[in-house]
């Protein structure tokens, strides 16, 4: 029966021929174990259907798919049925036919259980690897070993990435977040850390910060209540720690600006981050933003005068002894150079913080 089963597999299933010698030997052992198990089961001996699969190593579930295992069970059952019709007395055939039908059902359920547990084990292992990768990015310990682990999860090495941090939802919410991110074309690595959820997004849709921010805004409902802070884009996973650092700093400081939007860029929180002790935010304001203003003395004086005058165009013009149109022109230039509009209360606050920190730094 075992030889007939292997012959039938080779004749009816092309995948059997493509297997290596070791995998074919496993199938041979499984077929023999299944047939021997039927003899024990039918004779009334104590028998566990899943014991049939103990003959093959755990790696079998990685080399032989569930569909192939179903083909094996079906083919073995058909061969046994044929042998019953030719090798056994006519009076025994009907009982044996009924027996093999019940037995094959038990074996099929046992195979499903084996593969289900293997899938759960792989899922749990993948979750541990994913948590390790995310933790390494947050800790700025993204070495070659971490990149290799990420590749086993299907992460593309050439993908730009961005880190977002928000409140950790219920366990089912993480699954919904993955599903929603995939629909948007985003690759995702995600791991809860205490009461916060750290997400690393990648994929071809991560191109510009504004577009990526708009995509992540659509995922806000999948986080727990509270702000979600998005870090700047990094060129690869190896450099994602900078995005994670900015996002983590922004998430800690977001409570100082509850009036802000639900989803924020880490750059939107530069003043709060600076006040909370983030040296990177202070340096950004003092050595990147402030020098753009300080390079033009007139623009710096106009910005300070305008903010001191309560954002009054006329009062600023009188204090500087210039025409209001001149003030209006200089304010426009300030916005072009810095990206911040002094007339906006929030952006004016950022400029004021930059000027203060820049002067202290100088």
Image (tube, rainbow, N blue to C red):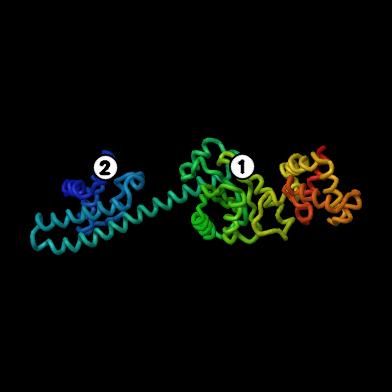
Q: How many circles with numbers are drawn on the protein?
A: 2
Q: Quadrant of the C terminus?
A: top right
Residue 149 coordinates in the image, percent (x, y): 49, 41
Residue 153 coordinates in the image, percent (x, y): 47, 45
Residue 155 coordinates in the image, percent (x, y): 49, 44
Q: Is residue 184 left or right of residue 105?
A: right
Q: Residue at x 88, y 49 (%)?
A: 322
Q: Is residue 105 left or right of residue 351?
A: left
Q: Residue at x 62, y 57 (%)?
A: 167
The front one of 63 and 338 is 338
In contact (CB < 8 Å): disc 1 and disc 2: no
Q: Residue at x 19, y 63 (%)?
A: 98
* Secondary element at image label 2: helix
Mark 1 closeness class: few <14, some 14–19, many ≥20 residues within 10 Å: many
Q: Which mark is residue 19?
A: none
In the image as oriented, which residue stretches furthest toward the top?
A: 144
Residue 101 coordinates in the image, percent (x, y): 22, 61
**Quadrant in which residue 281 is drawn:** top right
Q: Residue at x 25, y 54 (%)?
A: 73
- Looking at the image, is mark 1 or mark 2 earlier in the sequence? 2
Could you tell me how far apart the alpha carbons at marks 1 and 2 are, in whole angstroms? 44 Å
Q: What residue is disc 1 on?
A: 241
Mark 2 closeness class: few <14, some 14–19, many ≥20 residues within 10 Å: few
Q: Which mark is residue 18?
A: 2
């Amino acid at each position: 029966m075992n030889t007939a089963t292997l012959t039938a597999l080779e004749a009816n299933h092309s995948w059997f021929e493509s297997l290596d010698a070791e995998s074919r030997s496993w199938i041979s052992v499984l077929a023999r174990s299944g047939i021997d198990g039927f003899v024990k089961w039918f004779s009334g001996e104590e028998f566990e259907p899943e014991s049939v699969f103990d003959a093959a190593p755990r790696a079998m579930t990685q080399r032989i798919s569930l569909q192939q295992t179903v083909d094996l069970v079906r083919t073995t059952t058909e061969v046994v049925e044929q042998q019953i019709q030719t090798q056994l007395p006519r009076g025994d055939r009907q009982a044996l036919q009924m027996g093999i039908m019940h037995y094959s059902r038990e074996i099929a359920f046992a195979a499903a259980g084996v593969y289900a547990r293997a899938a759960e084990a792989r899922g749990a292992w993948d979750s541990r690897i994913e948590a390790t990768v995310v933790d390494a990015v947050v800790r700025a310990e993204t070495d070659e070993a971490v990149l290799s682990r990420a590749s086993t999860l299907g992460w593309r090495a050439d993908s730009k990435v961005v880190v977002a941090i928000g409140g950790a939802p219920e366990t089912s919410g993480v699954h919904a977040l993955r599903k929603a991110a995939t629909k948007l074309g985003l690759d995702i690595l995600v791991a809860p850390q205490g009461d916060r959820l750290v997400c690393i997004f990648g994929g071809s849709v991560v191109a510009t910060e504004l577009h990526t921010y708009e995509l992540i805004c659509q995922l806000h409902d999948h986080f727990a209540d509270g702000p979600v802070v998005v870090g700047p884009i990094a060129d690869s996973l190896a450099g994602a720690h900078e995005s994670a650092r900015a996002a983590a700093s922004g998430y800690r400081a977001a409570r100082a600006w509850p009036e802000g939007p639900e989803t924020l860029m880490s750059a939107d929180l530069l003043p709060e981050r600076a006040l909370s002790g983030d040296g990177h935010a202070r340096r950004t304001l003092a050595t990147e933003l402030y020098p753009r203003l300080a390079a033009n003395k007139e623009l710096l004086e106009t910005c300070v005068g305008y903010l001191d005058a309560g954002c009054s165009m006329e009062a600023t013009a009188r204090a500087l002894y210039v025409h209001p149109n001149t003030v209006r022109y200089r304010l426009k230039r300030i916005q072009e150079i810095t990206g911040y509009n002094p007339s906006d209360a929030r952006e004016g606050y950022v400029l004021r913080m930059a000027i203060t920190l820049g002067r202290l730094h100088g």
